Every structure is written in structure tokens, then in C-alpha cells.
Image (cartoon, helix red, strand yellow):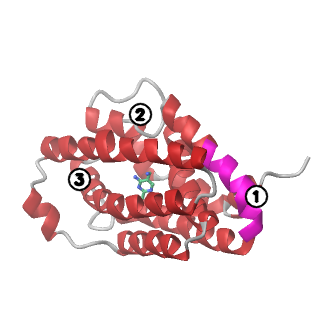
């Protein structure tokens, strides 16, 4: 049986992908023992990720060749702009992170890298490039979230970050992204491979950066 294109990209980055989904951040989050400072540092950066992520999703909508795909992507955009953004705001309140602190905190290198790669993929106007980055961002997050043991921690800041990335709608969305990449990726294989690999490297660096200010 031939390997799915999306799966062949993932396998080409297996070592880094596995280090990311088994990261200390994931372990500590899943056990509800992640330090508030680490969670806050991570969420401040990740809320910045969201803006360029929406640019990327918009580019995927614009560059897709199918109305049906645009509908799926558009529904997901609604979730990100609603439920997911609201989670960040509630989490910042719970962690005592005010807007001043958020705006004074500079981007880490992986955040800057992610913003740049998502805008770069958007600017290619290639659906395959957009799908490659989306497959990493969502597929890798589904993978780590599914590894978190149940029951989830009682703190909503921890538990909801897992359930936002492991719920039936998200599972279907990741399956859709994989099917789309299998369908259009082989036509733009080198481009897709390049974006996919760089995005996996950034995911690992993004988790590492949450611990960069100390050993919390
Ligand atoms: C860095 C990163 N990568 C992926 C996701 C999941 N959308 C996220 N929130 N942040």
C-alpha cells in the first residue's frame, strides 16, 4: 500500500515531531503541574500566533479549488475567532496577565518565526503550502492532546487547552486537512515538504521557548 502524502511528510520529520508531542510542556500541562509563569509565557506568545494563523486560514480559503473546502475552513475560522480567542482572554484573567504585560512582552524567536512562515505560506497563494503549515499546526496539536491522560486536570486553563485540540470537531478538521494535503500536495511536493519541515521545527522551538526564562 502506498503511503499517504501527508503521512510521508510527517514521517520525514518523525524525530522532531515526536520530541514536540512528548515535550515537557505537554507532560506538565497534562498532569496539571505546569508552573503558572510557564503557562502564561506560552499563552502570551500563542495568542500572537493566532493573528497570523488567521491570515493563513484566510489564504487557504482564498487559494482552495473547492467551495466545499472553503466551507470547512470557514467554519473553523469561526471557532478560532470565537471559542479559542475567548479561552485566551479567560486564561489571561485567571493567570493575572494584564494587557500591559502582554503588550510589553517581546516576541520570542519561534513566535517571530511562526508569524513569518504563516505569512510566507499565505503569500505563495499555493493551497498546498498553506495546507502543509496547517497540517503541522493542527495535526501535531491533535497528536499531543490525544496523548494526555484522562481525567484531565481540574484547572480550566490546563484542561481546555487540551480539549480545544482534542474534540470530535477538531478530529474531523485534522482528517479534512490531511485529505486535502493528500489530494493537492503531490502536485506541489517540494514546496509542501519545505513548509512542513520548517513548521515542525518551529513547533518544537515554540514549546522550548516557554521555558527559556528559567527552569520554572
Ligand atoms: C504554536 C502553535 N501551534 C499550533 C497551534 C494549534 N492551533 C497553536 N495554538 N500554537
Q: Position of residue 89 (x, y in %)?
A: 19, 46
Q: Residue at x 74, y 54 (%)?
A: 183
> Which secondary structure lies at badge 1?
helix
Q: Residue at x 10, y 58 (%)?
A: 99
Identify the mark at residue 189; answer none if there is no mark. Answer: none
Left/right placement of residue 190 relative to residue 90 reads: right
Residue highlighted by disc 1: 8
> Which secondary structure lies at badge 2?
helix
Residue highlighted by disc 2: 163
Q: In the rendered image, which quarter contains the C terminus?
A: bottom left
Residue lying furthest top = 151
The mark nearer the N terminus, 1 or 2, is 1
Q: Return the residue nearer the eye: 216 or 92.
A: 92
Snapshot quadrant of residue 155: top left
Image: 18 above or below 191: above
Q: Return the residue nearer the eye: 94 or 55.
A: 55
Q: Residue at x 55, y 62 (%)?
A: 133
Determine whether label 1 and label 2 are within 8 Å by CB: no
Amino acid at each position: 500500500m502506498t503511503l499517504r502524502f501527508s503521512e510521508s511528510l510527517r514521517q520525514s520529520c518523525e524525530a522532531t515531531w515526536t520530541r514536540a508531542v512528548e515535550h515537557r510542556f505537554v507532560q506538565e500541562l497534562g498532569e496539571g503541574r505546569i508552573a503558572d509563569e510557564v503557562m502564561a509565557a506560552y499563552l502570551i506568545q500563542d495568542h500572537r500566533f493566532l493573528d497570523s494563523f488567521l491570515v493563513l486560514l484566510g489564504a487557504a480559503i482564498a487559494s482552495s479549488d473547492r467551495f466545499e473546502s472553503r466551507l470547512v475552513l470557514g467554519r473553523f475560522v469561526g471557532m478560532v475567532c470565537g471559542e479559542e480567542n475567548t479561552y485566551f482572554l479567560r486564561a489571561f484573567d485567571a493567570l493575572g496577565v494584564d494587557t500591559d504585560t502582554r503588550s510589553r512582552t517581546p516576541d520570542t524567536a519561534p513566535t517571530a518565526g511562526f508569524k513569518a512562515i504563516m505569512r510566507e505560506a499565505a503569500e505563495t497563494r499555493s493551497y498546498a503550502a498553506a495546507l502543509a503549515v496547517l497540517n503541522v499546526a493542527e495535526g501535531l496539536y491533535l497528536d499531543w492532546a490525544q496523548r494526555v491522560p484522562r481525567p484531565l486536570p481540574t484547572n480550566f486553563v490546563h484542561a481546555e487547552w487540551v480539549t480545544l485540540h482534542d474534540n470530535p470537531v477538531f478530529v474531523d478538521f485534522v482528517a479534512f486537512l490531511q485529505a486535502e494535503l493528500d489530494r493537492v500536495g503531490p502536485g506541489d511536493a517540494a514546496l509542501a515538504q519545505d513548509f512542513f519541515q520548517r513548521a515542525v521545527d518551529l513547533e518544537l522551538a515554540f514549546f522550548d521557548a516557554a521555558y527559556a526564562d528559567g527552569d520554572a
